[in-house]
Image (tube, helix red, strand yellow):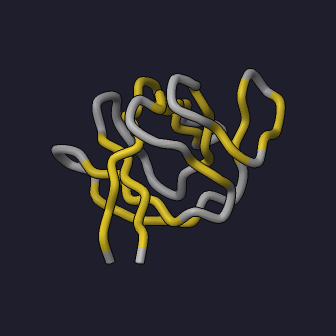
């Protein structure tokens, strides 16, 4: 599987387990498989839902900031990749 960088985590909310991601290099859709990687972070998951300013969205483009629920803790500066076949 190939991977394409789409953005970076800039904030993490621990109670709802949501990563705030700034899309600087690519777009993202619900259903995409992503990998989040950093100094102590490395896991992949499917994007099950996304929000922009507390409104559910199905896709987001370069330049937007989205909230994605994660299964694990992430940290600011972690890179976000979209996994493609």
Q: Quadrant of the C terminus?
A: bottom left
Give me the residue at 42% from left, 70% from top: 84
Determine whether 47 is above or below 69 in the image: below
Give me the residue at 28% from left, 51% from top: 37
Give me the residue at 52% from left, 23% from top: 63
Measured as percent of width and height from the top left, residue 36 is found at: 36, 52
Measured as percent of width and height from the top left, residue 19 is found at: 52, 37
Residue at the right extreme, as displayed: 55
Determine whether 48 is above or below 69 in the image: below
**Would you say 85 lies left or right of 61 here?**
left
Give me the residue at 38% from left, 59% from top: 35
Determine whether 82 is above or below 77 in the image: below
Q: Nearer the viewer, residue 73 or 42?
A: 42
Measured as percent of width and height from the top left, residue 41 is found at: 27, 51
- Quarter of the image holding residue 2? bottom left
Measured as percent of width and height from the top left, residue 69 is found at: 62, 47
- Quarter of the image holding residue 75? top left
């Amino acid at each position: 599987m190939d991977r394409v960088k789409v953005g970076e985590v800039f904030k993490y909310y621990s109670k709802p387990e949501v990563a705030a991601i700034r899309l600087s290099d690519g777009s993202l859709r619900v259903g995409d498989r992503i990998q989040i990687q950093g100094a102590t972070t490395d896991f992949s998951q499917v994007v099950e839902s996304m929000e922009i300013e507390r409104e559910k969205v199905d896709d987001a483009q370069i330049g937007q900031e989205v909230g994605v629920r994660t299964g694990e803790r992430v940290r600011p500066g972690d890179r976000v990749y979209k996994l493609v076949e």
